[in-house]
Amino acid sequence: MILTVTLNAALDVTYGVDSLRPRTSHRVDTARERAGGKGVNVARVLAALGHESAVTGLAGGPTGTLLRDGLRTAGLRDELVTVSGDSRRTLTVVSRDDGDATVFNQRGPRVSPGEWKTFTEHFASLVRDATVVALCGSLPPGLPSDAYAQLVRTATGAGAVTVLDTSGPALLDALGAGPDVVKPNAAELADVTGSRDVPAAAERLRALGARTVVASSGPEGVHAATPQGAWRAVPPKQLAGNPTGAGDACVAALAAGHATGAQWPDILREAVALSAAAVPCPVAGDFDAGTYRRFRTAVSVEEVHAAHTH
């Protein structure tokens, strides 16, 4: 079983507009609501790929009830832990004229120390049945900055592979726990290392404790720095659409690859193909099956020389 963790689960709202212009009103042509947060989106992709998964994290209030209803509707296993605060909503505005997405993220409910303790105990029981754990997204207010480090240590102790997709201090504070894979995008990588040289910055995170770093750069593909070597995987072409779900699709491929014991070049080929196939879809957590099939055999994967930090 693959366990996905979304500590700051959300009700994702997506608006479609002709074009997004500052300081004016807009007519919304399409509006969609669904259970979300990065780990929930990862679980949706895994389910579509045929992998058994479970969704855990924190949810509360009326929005949390809508979240749980959404998981049930999607056929996803609900292992969320209830908190007293109301879960957050996110708003994504997708502009059809250029395909750009503008995202507004609420911070989420404040989580008490007692609620965090309840969650960590529930997580420890769930992870015993997991082969891979995907830990995704931001930390809600009230959680310690080393929250992911705590979960990584618990998962590693239970024998599970950990895939971490977060940013900023939550990412830096987790590295000392030795996550198996971290997946920042290029901007997040530059933010925590101060370097825009993706291979060098990836090696810096490895030096801080990450076993493998998979850095995504949108249409330029991914760079992976692993104990077995470094690779670059690139999609055959750029696709127009909503890129907000591409990173979650990438994480799903990384988790699925480790669950099946695939080798890194094959994992990266799947990751880029799934990421690209998510872009044409209007909401995160979906991917276009036809694009995925075509790209699986068209993604270019090449081994590169790893950078060295000094």
Image (cartoon, rainbow, N blue to C red):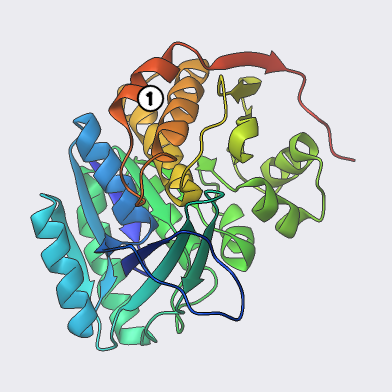
Of 201 and 30, the residue lying toward us: 30
- Seen at 29% across and 55% down, the residue is 40
Residue lying furthest right in this view?
310
Residue 266: tell me if it is visible: yes
Residue kind at label 1, given as amino acid type: Thr
Give above or below for 260 relative to 124: above
Q: How many marks?
A: 1
> Where residue 107 sits: x, y (%)?
46, 79
Give above or below for 129 relative to 51: below
Q: Viewed as shown, does residue 193 lie left or right of 253?
A: right
- Seen at 17% across and 38% down, the residue is 52
Of 172 and 222, the residue lying toward us: 222
- Seen at 39% across and 87% down, the residue is 110
Q: Which residue is mark 1?
A: 291
Which of the 4 image quadrants contains residue 287? Answer: top left
Which of the 4 image quadrants contains residue 235? Answer: top right
Of 299 and 98, the residue lying toward us: 98
In the picture, the quarter occupied by the C terminus is top right
Q: Viewed as shown, does residue 269 lie left or right of 204?
A: left
Q: Viewed as shown, does residue 236 lie left or right of 251?
A: right
Which of the 4 image quadrants contains residue 249? Answer: top left
Q: Viewed as shown, does residue 102 lie left or right of 229?
A: left
Give above or below for 227 relative to 9: above
> Where residue 26 sits: x, y (%)?
46, 73
Q: Secondary structure at mark 1?
A: helix
In the picture, the quarter occupied by the N terminus is top left
